[in-house]
Image (cartoon, rainbow, N blue to C red):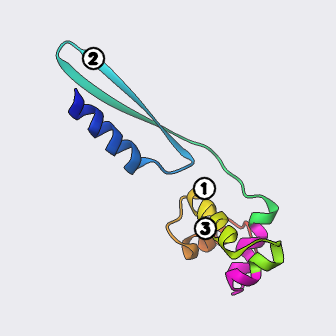
């Protein structure tokens, strides 16, 4: 049973990407253990500030200038950018920009 707990812990951390929530159900049936995974996607829409930030990135502005425009530290902007990439399941900023362009979220 300890090995199963380690497996579930490792699997949950590898598979977790917001906004996808993983629910694990361990079903005991006689001597066999079956694991089922149910995923639920949440429809997310960006805020106006998020759109403005990504639009500025798409136009070629540096992150430092964008952070100054929003009145925050560059590290805070980097944190928000990391959150945005996780929110829209993008691996990097280029993929985030192309997601916004592809879905007509920015011009």
Q: Name the residue at 63% across, 62% down.
A: 84
Q: Is residue 52 magenta?
A: yes
Q: Name the residue at 77% across, 71% down.
A: 72
- The percent coordinates of residue 87 (x first, y second) are 60, 56
Reading the image, the residue beneath label 1 is 87
Q: Name the residue at 69% across, 70% down.
A: 77
Q: Nearer the viewer, mark 2 or mark 3?
A: 2
Q: CA distance from mark 1 to mark 2?
A: 34 Å
Reading the image, the residue beneath label 3 is 99
The region drawn magenta spans 51-65
Q: Can residue 83 be seen in this snapshot?
A: yes
Q: Quadrant of the C terminus?
A: bottom right
The extreme top residue here reads 30
N-terminal-most mark, 2 or 3: 2
Of residue 105 and residue 54, the one placed in the foreground of this image is 54
Residue 42 falls left or right of residue 52: left
**Residue 80 in which image quadrant:** bottom right
Q: CA distance from mark 2 to mark 3?
A: 42 Å
What's the magenta bit mostly, secondary-structure-wise? helix
Q: Badge 3: few (under 14), some or many (20 or more) residues near its Cα, within 10 Å?
A: some
- Image position of 60 with respect to 24: above or below: below
**Residue 33 in which image quadrant:** top left
Which label was assigned to residue 28? 2
Q: CA distance from mark 3 to mark 1?
A: 12 Å
N-terminal-most mark, 3 or 1: 1
Residue 77 falls left or right of residue 16: right
Q: Badge 2: few (under 14), some or many (20 or more) residues near its Cα, within 10 Å?
A: few
Of residue 73 and residue 90, the one placed in the foreground of this image is 73
**Residue 104 in which image quadrant:** bottom right
- The percent coordinates of residue 24 (x first, y second) are 40, 31
């Amino acid at each position: 049973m300890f090995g199963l707990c380690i497996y579930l812990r490792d699997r949950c951390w590898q598979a977790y990407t917001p906004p996808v929530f993983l629910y694990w159900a361990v079903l005991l049936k006689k001597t066999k253990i079956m694991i089922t995974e149910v995923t639920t996607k949440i429809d997310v829409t960006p805020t106006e500030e998020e759109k403005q930030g990504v639009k500025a990135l798409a136009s070629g502005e540096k992150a430092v200038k964008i952070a100054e425009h929003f009145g925050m530290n560059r590290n805070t902007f980097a944190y928000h950018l990391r959150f945005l990439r996780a929110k829209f399941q993008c691996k990097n900023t280029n993929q985030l920009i192309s997601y916004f362009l592809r879905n007509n979220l920015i011009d």
